[in-house]
Image (cartoon, rainbow, N blue to C red):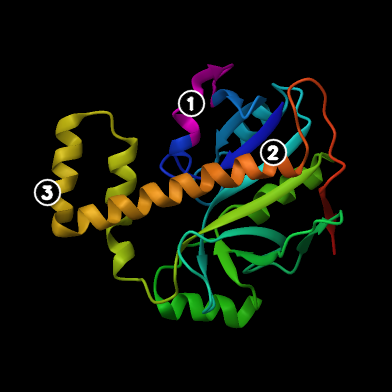
Amino acid sequence: MVAITCALFDEAFELIRILKNEKIDGVSQFNGVIGHVPVSLFLTRPGFHRKAKFNKWLTQHPFQAFINTGFAGSLQAGFKVGDICPISSVKHYKKRKKFSLKVHGKNSQKTYSLCTSPTIANTLDEKEDIYHNSKCQLVDMEAWNLLEILKKQKQDLPLRVVKIVGDLPEEGDLLKHEEKMRSYFSSFKTLEKLKIIGQTGISFVPLYKRKKMLQKKLYDAVLDSLSIMNINEKDFSANSIIIKLLEK
């Protein structure tokens, strides 16, 4: 079985649609099969505030590999919304420790650097500050915390971190509706959805199409990761490309 972590429901929407929502010993998770591979998906929430639940979840399944995915903000020019970015290094905005994710194999992909910030970075000034201090290409709120926990628990599993570019440095105004879009996809009530559409106004349709595109990209990134790591439902091998956790 493969462990998958993602911060938010709306990010993992396309995965969740084909998985079963279960609560095992108090831990909410989504279990099932993706691309013929048994998986369990755990939502960490922004900033990785479900550490106790996460630690418990790790003991509930015989995990053979780990995939962390989700949306990330770009800190440099040259990215497009929807770019799929395998990560090779993860820094923390306020801590010195850095994790390197080493890619093995002849078919190694282009990889990117990621900075984990303890706070949301929406404005251009906030992103420029993070880039100035980290020199990373992308920013999220979870990956470094996840790797720190896996290291402490001595989880020596094949690991892949892959992020989808969800916003560009200059898109601060667009992101003011982000919370409404998250609520739209997590709500199961028609009236609530209609209310959100009304609050968002003419921006709703382009934002909805953008979110659906990003969700599909994340689904594709997970399928690609399972293929790259050469995982199948009968036996596990990771001979093509393995990303292992190292610490610098």
Please give the residue where the numbered disc 3 appears in the rendered image: 198
Mark 2: which amino acid? Leu
Q: Quadrant of residue 121?
A: bottom left
Task: Give the tally of numbered discs.
Answer: 3
Q: Residues within 10 Å of mark 2 (few under 14, many from 20)?
A: many
Helix, strand or loop status at disc 3: helix
Residue closest to the eye, 190 or 28: 190
Based on the picture, tell me whether residue 122 belongs to the magenta stretch: no
- What's the residue at 20%, 59% (across, down)? 203
Q: Residues within 10 Å of mark 3 (few under 14, many from 20)?
A: few
Q: Position of residue 80 (x, y in %)?
A: 48, 68
Bounds of the magenta segment: 15-29
Residue 160, compared with residue 136, is above or below; it is above
Residue closest to the eye, 187 or 78: 78
Foreground mark, 3 or 2, reads: 2
Based on the picture, tell me whether residue 24 belongs to the magenta stretch: yes
- What's the residue at 81%, 42% (across, down)? 158
Mark 1: which amino acid? Ile
Please give the residue where the numbered disc 1 appears in the rendered image: 18
Q: Quadrant of residue 134?
A: bottom right
